[in-house]
């Protein structure tokens, strides 16, 4: 398979997620970073680009310039896709321009800062036929894929209940005021949008709940708080999720759960059984049954009944732990498989799915509903 | 110390909690079961009484008869206290009569079936000066005591957030219709009261949250469901808890979380740190800090800074696991220490606390608020 | 069932294991402590006896006096059995005298201090027909019973390998010289016998390995050490176990594994599967299979295929953790079931087994072989 | 930093470890695979080379050809180093030739098949001044680095005891006879050398024990078995390790521990504390203390006292699990840092250490001693 060419917007020195995207893109040897506008600060962009071995001519000072110039390159040089890893308010612009220029787009989450923006992006994606991947990266874990496959296959029976939690503690003090760049933009409504923790991590939890259960939330009741004095956006919230089919859920997202690292977990209960998955020990999926002992499904095992979804997202044998970067890379791999299939007129593998523009739009609807419900004292609000 | 005499109402053959009370009372050699009205079925009462080695003259067919007769016995024969282990609707009557007769009362939870009943009981307890213990037994675990002691001591800083969950799966099918006596009364409004899972296990979770954090809930937003078709009372619910001081909480209680055994857990987050405790592995208390590695506090260890609360509720050295019965027995022990202290005119050890009539009243207020909020679409409701 | 009468030798104030025996005997309401010679110090014996509510006439200063006097009592007053909880060197004498007097004997482990003593005891047990229980209490855990039942049933296939570890850290400093009475006699060859850690905890590990695998060790290679300067007996050792059938094992026992509490674990590997059990979280038995996902068997669950051994040794439903005292009590219960069956001419339940005189003799053979092998530089030594 | 050029010998389609090396080399963007002799089968070599995007002219049929040709290339094209990922018996030849040609060498473990070969390799490494890395990859985990750093810093006090285990179950049936290529060469003395499991995984365990404790084994007592009928080499063994300073250890390696995946763990006990690390959940290091609660050190955390070794081997924040590939990549990164430093005449970072030729020689000495001891019935044998 040809290695795909990739451009990057954002992700310069000091970025948290930029390097993750680059490692994820590189690990399977399927992508090559060929150009970038890594920062609004040209000096930073240059440092990052050079370190990545990109020729000076393809290191840009602005994303507009990059898209314009790269669009002029011959088809064997121009990027197949562009990765956007800027703060939330800077997803919409680059994504629109890149799509219109004919590039596929890999975009960090949340999609943008409003349902209106999201709807426009959806329209452009549909019109241009370009592929769009939103890095709700936790769906890339093999055991998440396995969980979804089991639920789709009816192994747990009708799903009745989901509990999804995303707990972090790193913002339990006002770090946004003490030079932490990651915190600064996340706590700033101008750059983060209408929500704080709920946008940053709550949307991951929401996406994971819908992805694993294969059900859509139709309404919710939310309570948001800004716990740290002086903070404008929410840093903690609880949401009761109502699904169309009578199923219910609880979503908890907090960045002031002091001492928690990156504790994302999901539990799903159906008529016949339940399951638990925890991101911090991602290679075990716990299955609980009404009529049989607990089972632990493990990444890399291939027993009768293992299914195809998990093995397809696993690189090494059982007991050799795979982690965050590998899961992230699974989205890149799937996205690139789709690009190649499109280019070659093939139908992609149906198991190589990845979160796309629809998931982005749903995330925006979730955020607007959460903020509205909380403002109306937890009133049940349609999505 | 003299062994205290104990009578029992309810808890005959087929009871789940009756034998637990008897084991808990016996393990430390401090109590002796001297009389009982173990069942509304005289044959059952007789079988249980005989097996317990109680003379026929003190095995009764009704609790009224028992209280009346035992009240006539000389002071060196009459019970010091009466334990009530009947279904919820049969707590109020026996408790009132026993208190008025001058017996101390050990009562299973929830206290009764309404705030009105609870208030009356509280009045009688206060008037008679009799001691009243409500078996919110999870407060008897050493690590729960340690958690509370740390929070009281300010070690976690101001508490901001609590997550308490009580998940069971045993009612995920309509077991109340298939001969399961435990399920039958719990699912019957006539015997259980206004709530199902929320009364049976939600009140434990509520009590634990208030006990550990040393804070009181002032309002809540609740969503209850009856998941199993045909079930009248709730079998699943989520509650957002608002505490007076800006602190917030989430309470989840379910008896349809298929595959879950008796999964009660509590997590508390303060300004400086957080903690986690899980009932099913009760001998570990996990502490998470903003500025130091995670610590595991273990039952039976006595390091500098261990405090006095946990060791006082521990029987054997670290690494020799103590469990449910021992924790239950800790409430009996504390209650009996208070009875002896009262009899001897001593002040009891302040760490030998146990849940009492106030906790029972709060539980009833919680239940009524939960039911009201859920009926009004999760509207925030004062407690 | 009649409550059985029990006498106790040793176990006075300051004893670790005396109170455990009393709690274990009491919890199920099947035994009543009626007499005791609790200490070689009459004052201590008196205090303990009084606290236990024993009349002064049946509190003794010496065990000889106790056995002599109690033997004179009428059959409805004399103890059914005598529990011996003295240091190792004081098991043989009381056990011999009690057996000869016609009492059944419950004895703490290890059985005695030599194979010669053990063989004599065995002879007397056989001759008198009295019952003898040795408190290798870890065999009382429900999940240990389940493990053995599965192995007996061939579910793991032919057993090939066992790893058993017993790690403690409490003797990692010379506590025997700083007033720790528990350490003092364990470190003293005059009271502990020929081995230290190997006698105190290694025999538990050895017994557990043989009990669970249903196989006997035929030879071994051992390396013992006295790590703490000045200590005479071993405080640490590794033993390679050879079983007659080609099966192999590793046994590690240490009391200088700093920081370890009471970390006894056993792992068994057969042709078809493996299992793991850890005493410190005793309610889970992990099964690993060559062709299927890991399973967790949990105390208190009753699924198809659960077998009868675990439920019979469980008191409360799944998720309500049972611990050390309950497991200990299971041996008391089984032993008392055998006594009652013998008295009533019934055959006892075959699942109500308990470690007896044979297990004691094997423990002594193990100790002598370990010490001999270690002295000969790990030479393989027959048992 | 310039990207380093890398050649590869072995690791073609069907190889387990070849792809791991390639992912590890790629993830950090520091290496570029420029040539390879991926298989003794030219067709396989070609397929692998093409998939890796290597021009046909640099895909070779034999390693001899590759080394000869690549050695002729100008300095800006020839590889900086050669990675050897062939079966054990094919390490020595390629390594010798590559070193003599002036290439640095990255070699899979174990180093070779005899102490004699190892000594020759050591001589050539020293004479040529070329760098040599042996992929005892488990030393690349951040928590292993932290453990070693703490022990070096004396935080656990004098080390007394180490327990290291490496348990797998995948060879519990005669898979070498059923088309499993990985098993076939490992079970074949002609390709694996004098030992089976002990060479394949026992050497990892041995290396880890010496690396973490910073102590060398001086003698040992070993018992090896071939459990599966017909197997020639050992598939299971236990070794008692004696260290020069009175410290002791137990090493267990098995590939017939049915159901185990890749269960490598190490426990170390010193005078003041102990530690536990498990490869399958590698981001937690458990510290146990004689006088303080258990601590969990987690990858990615940076508290006061974290030290520099772990952060230097970590890519992403705490709670984002890193795994096997990342640890493997840490060795590549360190090795390449040393190559660059050598090229540039700089002193490399002392914390960027990696296992080298000495570790390879020690592994061979370990294997020969183990086999000798086992043949002499566990007799203590010098290393």
Image: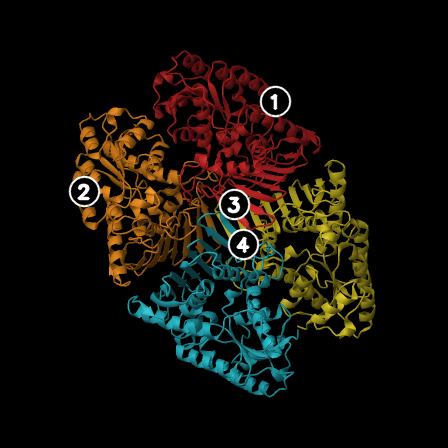
Chain colours: A yellow, B red, C orange, D cyan
Tag nearer the camera, 1 or 4: 4
Q: Residue at x 47, y 78 (%)?
A: D91
**Left of B343 or right of it: where is A270?**
right
**Left of B262 or right of it: where is D177?**
left
Could you say which is closer to the camera, residue C131 or residue B288? B288
Residue B91 on image: x %, y %: 52, 22
Tag 3, which chain? A
Looking at the rendered structure, the secondary structure element under dot 1 is: helix
Q: Residue at x 47, y 28 (%)?
A: B349
Looking at the rendered structure, the secondary structure element under dot 4 is: strand
* Residue labelled with disc 4: D297
Residue D37 on image: x %, y %: 55, 80
The reply to whether label 1 and label 4 mark residues of one chain is no
* Residue labelled with disc 3: A289
Q: Quadrant of the C terminus of chain A?
A: top right
Residue B39 appears in the figure: no
CA separation in Å, label 4 and label 3 = 34 Å
CA separation in Å, label 2 and label 3 = 48 Å
CA separation in Å, label 1 and label 4 = 48 Å
CA separation in Å, label 2 and label 4 = 55 Å
Tell me whether the residue at label 1 lies in contact with that at label 4, contact meaning CB atoms closer than 8 angstroms. Answer: no
* Residue labelled with disc 2: C126
Q: Which mark is residue B251?
A: none
């Amino acid at each position: 398979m040809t290695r795909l060419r990739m451009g990057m917007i954002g992700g310069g020195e000091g970025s948290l997620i930029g390097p993750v995207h680059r490692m994820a893109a590189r690990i399977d040897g399927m992508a090559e970073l060929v150009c970038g506008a890594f920062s609004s600060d040209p000096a930073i962009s240059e440092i990052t680009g050079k370190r990545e071995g990109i020729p000076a001519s393809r290191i840009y000072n602005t994303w507009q310039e990059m898209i314009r110039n790269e669009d002029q390159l011959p088809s064997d040089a121009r990027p197949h896709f562009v990765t956007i890893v800027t703060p939330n308010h800077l997803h919409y612009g680059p994504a629109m321009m890149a799509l219109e220029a004919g590039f596929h787009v890999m975009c960090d989450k949340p999609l943008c800062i409003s349902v209106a923006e999201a709807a426009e992006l959806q329209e452009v994606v549909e019109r241009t036929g370009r592929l769009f991947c939103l890095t709700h990266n936790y769906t890339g874990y093999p055991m998440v894929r396995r969980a979804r496959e089991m639920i789709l296959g009816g192994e747990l029976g009708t799903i009745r209940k989901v509990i999804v939690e995303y707990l972090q503690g790193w913002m339990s003090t006002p770090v946004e005021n003490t030079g932490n760049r990651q915190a600064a933009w996340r706590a700033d409504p101008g750059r983060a949008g209408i929500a704080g923790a709920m946008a940053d991590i709550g949307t991951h939890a929401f996406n994971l709940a819908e992805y694993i259960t294969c059900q859509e939330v139709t309404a919710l009741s939310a309570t948001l708080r800004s716990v740290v004095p002086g903070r404008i956006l929410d840093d903690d919230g609880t949401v009761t999720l109502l699904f169309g089919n009578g199923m219910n859920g609880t979503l908890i997202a907090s960045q002031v759960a002091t001492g928690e690292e990156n504790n994302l977990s999901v539990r799903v209960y159906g008529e016949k059984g339940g399951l638990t998955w925890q991101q911090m020990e991602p290679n075990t999926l716990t299955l609980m049954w009404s009529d049989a002992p607990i089972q632990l499904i493990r990444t890399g095992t291939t027993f009768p009944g293992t299914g195809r979804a998990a093995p397809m997202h696993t690189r090494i044998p059982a007991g050799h732990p795979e982690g965050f970067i590998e899961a992230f890379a699974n989205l890149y791999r799937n996205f690139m498989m789709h690009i190649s299939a499109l280019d070659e007129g093939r139908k992609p593998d149906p198991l190589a799915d990845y979160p796309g523009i629809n998931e982005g739009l749903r995330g925006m609807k979730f955020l607007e509903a959460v903020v509205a419900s909380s403002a109306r004292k937890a009133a049940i609000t349609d999505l």
